[in-house]
Structures are given as structure tokens and as C-alpha cells.
Amino acid sequence: MPPRVERCDTDAELLNRWRAGETKAGETLFSRHLVHVYRFFRNKCAGDADDLVQSTFLACLRGRDQFEGRSSFRTYLYTIARNELYRHLRKSRKLAREVDFSTDSVAAILTGAGTMLDRKRAMANVRNALMRLPVDQQLLLELHYWHELDPRALGEVFGVLPGTIRTRLFRARRILRGSLEPAIASSADLARLVRTAVDA
């Protein structure tokens, strides 16, 4: 009888079983995170989201034995996704040394690329404002609001301390809010709009 993989198994338990050779555990682990990784890419590179998801999971497959478990598997996966996004953006512009993800936005890197930002006017404005942010700020806000990563997990993804993440979140919110004024009166409004816009 094949081993049963229960939905209640933690990511760590599934990862350990997968490393031990239980293929079904790996499939369950990937299935659990597939939608989230796809959404991560959809708002930035809609036309290439499928390929980026595949490259993320392939990189995870290749590196599964190197994952030490100091962070959550989800955080590890988002770190891989972020690296794959950066690789893709560099390649798409053939600017391997010229792209600065702390200052360049997805819109600037992928000028002329079609997006999925034409649904609702208000949400399109928020998504456009997000895409005008530097890539690191856009990723930070999306991972925080949409993927619900806390400053500690975000620190692991970005390779900085949680206090640095809090400062970066404050700055990113301020910049985004400034580009949306006067429609955004409070942090709660901003959080609601970011969650809705990214998920739309």
C-alpha cells in the first residue's frame, strides 16, 4: 500500500518525506504552494507566469536537499521565486548588469509589455502604482499584504533584519500612498486596496 499523504501534514513533514523518496509528498508540497507562486508572478510578468512558476519549482527540486529549515518552506519558495523573477527581468532586457531592483520598476524594465491591469479602474490604478514602485518595494508590499509574510519571514526572503524590513515597508507604503492620494486616507485603506488589487 502506498504511503498516505494527509492534508494536515506540515510543509516540514512533507519535505522530509519527499527527501526520503516519497514522491507523493513532494507533489503535495508543490500543489499546496502552486497557486501562491503563480499569483506572485502573475502581477509582474503575466505572459511568462507559467514558465516562471515552472523554473521556480525546478530550482526548488534541484535545491531541496540544501534547504536547512531555518525558515519556513514557504519563505524558501518565495526566495527562489524572487531570484527567478530577477533572472527573468535581467534576461528580458538583456541588462544583466544594469538592472537595479532596488530602484527600477517592473513597468520600466518591461516597457510595452501587456498586463492584466485593465479590469476595474480603481484596482488598475493601485496595480499600476505598485508596478511603478522599484521591484524590491513592489515585492515587499505584495509578499506582506497578499502573501501575509511577517517582517521576520520577509527578512529571510530579502536577506536583511526584520527591523530593516519594517523601515522598508514604511517607506514603500508612503511612496505608494503618495502616488494614490487623495483616494487613500489611511494605512487600512491602503492595505485593503493592495490586497484587493493584487488578488484581482
Image (spheres, rainbow, N blue to C red):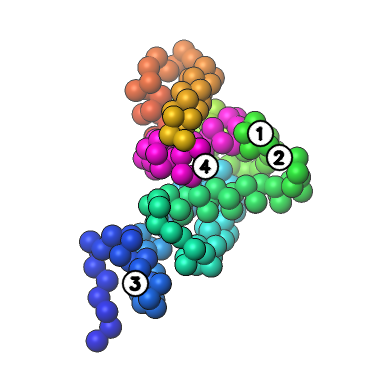
| Gap between marks 4 and 1 measured at Cα | 19 Å
Density class for disc 1 (Cα within 10 Å; few <14, some 14-19, many ≥20) is: some
Q: Would you say the residues marked 3 and 4 are in contact, meaning their CB atoms lie under 8 Å apart?
A: no
Residue depicted at x 53% and y 35%: 138
Dot 4 or dot 1, earlier in sequence: 1
What separation in Å lies between label 1 and label 2 (alpha carbons)?
7 Å
Check residue 167 for magenta coloring.
no
Q: Earlier in the sequence, mark 4 or mark 2?
A: 2
**Quadrant in which the N terminus is drawn:** bottom left
Q: Secondary structure at mark 3?
A: helix
Quarter of the image where one finds residue 166:
top left
Of the residues tagged 4 and 1, which is closer to the observer? 4
Q: Amino acid at mark 1?
A: Asp
87 in relation to 190, above or below: below
**Mark with earlier residue (3, 1):** 3
Q: Are marks 1 and 2 in contact (CB under 8 Å)?
A: yes
Q: For the residues carrying marks 3 and 1, which lies nearer the camera in this image?
A: 3
Q: Nearer the viewer, mark 3 or mark 2?
A: 3
Q: Amino acid at mark 2?
A: Val
Q: Of marks 3 and 4, which one's residue comes earlier in the chain? A: 3
Which disc is residue 159 wearing? 4
Instruction: Name which residue lies at 58% across and 30% down.
Output: 133
In this figure, which residue is indicated by the disc labeled 1?
104
Closer to the camera, 151 or 197?
A: 151
Does residue 111 appear left or right of residue 82 in this picture? right
- Relative to 34, residue 191 above or below: above
Amino acid on which disc 4 is placed: Gly
Label pair 3/1, CB-CB below 8 angstroms: no
Q: Earlier in the sequence, mark 3 or mark 2?
A: 3
**In the depicted view, which residue is nearer to us: 35 or 86?**
86
> Element at badge 4?
loop
Residue linked to disc 2: 99
